[in-house]
Amino acid sequence: MKDDIPPLRMTVEAGKLTPADAFSAERLESYRHGTTMFVQPITDPQSKKRRKFWAILGLVIKNCDTPWPTVKDAANAIKRTFGLMDDGGTTGNVRIMYPRSLNDLSEPEFEEFYEDAMLYLQRVTGVDPETLSKEAPDAGDDEPPASDGLPDAGKGSGGASPPAAAATPDRVECIAKFLQFATDEETSAQWKLENLAPTVKAAWVQQLPDDIPFVEACCRTAEQLIRGESKSPEATCYLKALAAKPKENGNGRHEGRNQENLRSGQSGR
């Protein structure tokens, strides 16, 4: 299962990182002091409502009598309750189902899931969702829209300056970030598999919202590279070929066949 607990939100202050909200501060305290952490700067991939969901689950596990030992167990139980599962095929006569990542839900879908989850938690714990929400650690506000940061921008225009147009990240940069993450020799394969979706994929879903199938293809290819199912040259060749296709033709319509070719080292031949 993809690890979809949001990353810690940190603020840069005078050469050091400090928690950006109470939820991140509480989570940071759960690590042993002196622990060395691998930090990859990315834009915040999680809305406040999503971070609030995990903050509430943490509060429930900590203070309520529940059948779940951990936050992840609680989240998976809620996903199973509301059918957020992926079909993993069959082993013998047993069908395998995996909990979906909440990062795969659109904001409207997550809003509906959140409301259902709060009612479910009320049934399990006997605590009103509003009480849970008020007592959970503050998850901070959502990030404001990006601006160019120029103090004199818009002067002489007869009014407030218009929002700065953010540079649209292209597919080439997206490929580079996924491959860089997958081939990092300083981190273990298990760590990369657990953190690929909640960090790199989540960030690029936000940056390329109209090209999500391509982002998902990059993520799947990176996973194959991490597992050793493909080599870096083949993965690079495959993704560059996919990036050269128009969105309506290159976003996964033939993804299954292309991925099989990649695994067998036949991509680009």
Image (cartoon, rainbow, N blue to C red):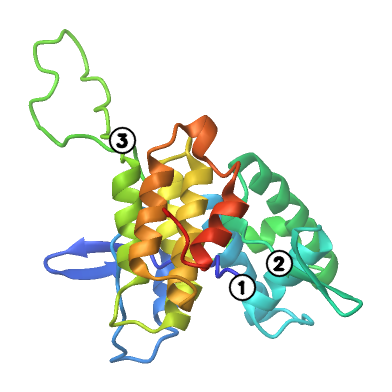
Q: Is residue 108 above or below residue 228?
A: above
Viewer-nearest residue: 166 or 18? 166
Mark 1 vs mark 3: give the one in front.
3
Viewer-nearest residue: 50 or 3? 3
Q: Mark 3 vs mark 2: which is more N-terminal?
A: 2
Q: What is the distance, in whole Å, between disc 2 and disc 1 at their CAs?
A: 22 Å
Q: Residue at x 63, y 71 (%)?
A: 1
Q: Amino acid at mark 3?
A: Thr
Q: Residue at x 49, y 68 (%)?
A: 223
Picture quarter with the C terminus: bottom left
The reply to whether residue 207 is in sight is no
Residue identified by numbered label 1:
59
- Whether residues under marks 3 and 2 lie with C-beta atoms below 8 angstroms apart, the answer is no
The answer to whether 248 appears left or right of 86 in the picture is left
Q: Mark 1 vs mark 3: which is more N-terminal?
A: 1
Q: Residue furthest top?
A: 158
Residue identified by numbered label 3:
168
Residue identified by numbered label 2:
99
Viewer-nearest residue: 202 or 57? 202
Q: Amino acid at mark 2?
A: Pro
Q: Tell me if mark 2 has few (under 14), some (14-19) or many (20+) residues whose alpha carbon lies within 10 angstroms of its own.
A: some
Element assignment for label 1: helix
Q: Amino acid at mark 1?
A: Leu
Element assignment for label 3: loop
